[in-house]
């Protein structure tokens, strides 16, 4: 996919929280996606406070964003985030970047709405919360 993000997509929030065994990757990012500037390429700027989102995770976030955007040019402003001293990792922030980018493409109409079913950690204004799994009733005696 190539092209440009056609319209702004504000307040995409991704919170990756995996529990593999006793702990797992954690990442939290809030970003605003905008159509690209005059240069037309990918831009990433973080105004999240360093104490909330350390700069060491930005290269992994950038990598995930680029993968998720799949050639679509966009300017991304990271406005907030958080990390966990033990569980945060580059892996978690790559996942967060990819999910945030795919969410922005879905909201902008560049991906089919069905794509949002794959975005288990992403939220954005207007997204309906995912439905919890239905409990199956068991026959009597089981």
Image (tube, rainbow, N blue to C red):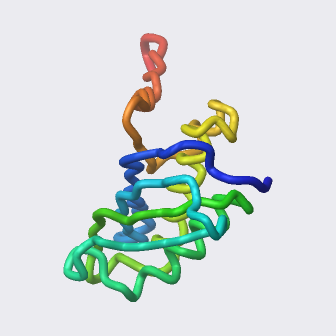
- Where residue 88 sits: x, y (%)? 37, 77
**Outermost residue to the bottom:** 56
Note whether residue 23 is visible. Answer: yes
Q: Which residue is drawn at 43% across and 16% down?
A: 141
Snapshot quadrant of residue 83: bottom left
Q: Is residue 22 above or below residue 70?
A: below
76 w.r.t. 136: above or below? below
Q: In which quarter of the image is the C terminus?
A: top left
**Residue placed at 54% from the left, 47% from the top?**
104
Q: Position of residue 108 (x, y in %)?
A: 58, 39
Question: Which sits in the foreground, 48 or 132?
Answer: 48
Residue at the image position 37 percent from the left and 68 percent from the top = 26
Q: In this view, does 64 lie to the left or right of 53?
A: right
How many numbered dots are placed on residues in this image?
Answer: 0
Which quadrant of the figure has residue 127?
top left
Residue name at image x 45 percent, y 66 percent? 20
Please state the horizontal and vertical placement of residue 89, each as a whole percent of the image.
43, 80
Residue lying farthest to the right in this orientation: 1
Q: Is residue 55 above or below residue 13?
A: below
Nearest the viewer among 130 and 14 is 14
Task: Name the one closer to the observer, 9 or 39.
Answer: 39
Residue 95 percent location from the top left of the image: 53, 65
In the image as oriented, which residue stretches furthest toward the top? 140
> Does 110 appear above or below 70?
above
Q: In this view, does 100 lie to the left or right of 55?
A: right
State whether residue 132 appears in this view.
no
């Amino acid at each position: 996919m190539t092209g440009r993000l056609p319209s702004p997509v504000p307040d995409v929030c991704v919170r990756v929280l995996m529990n593999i065994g006793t702990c797992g990757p954690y990442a939290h990012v809030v970003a605003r996606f905008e159509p690209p500037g005059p240069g037309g390429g990918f831009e990433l700027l973080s105004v999240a406070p360093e104490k909330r989102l350390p700069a060491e995770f930005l290269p992994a976030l950038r990598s995930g964003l680029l993968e998720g955007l799949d050639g679509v040019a966009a300017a991304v402003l990271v406005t907030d985030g958080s990390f966990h001293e033990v569980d945060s990792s580059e892996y978690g922030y790559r996942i967060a970047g990819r999910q945030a980018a795919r969410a922005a493409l879905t909201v902008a109409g560049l991906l089919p709405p069905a794509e949002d079913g794959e975005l288990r950690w992403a939220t954005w204004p207007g997204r309906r919360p995912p439905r919890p799994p239905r409990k199956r009733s068991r026959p009597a005696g089981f």
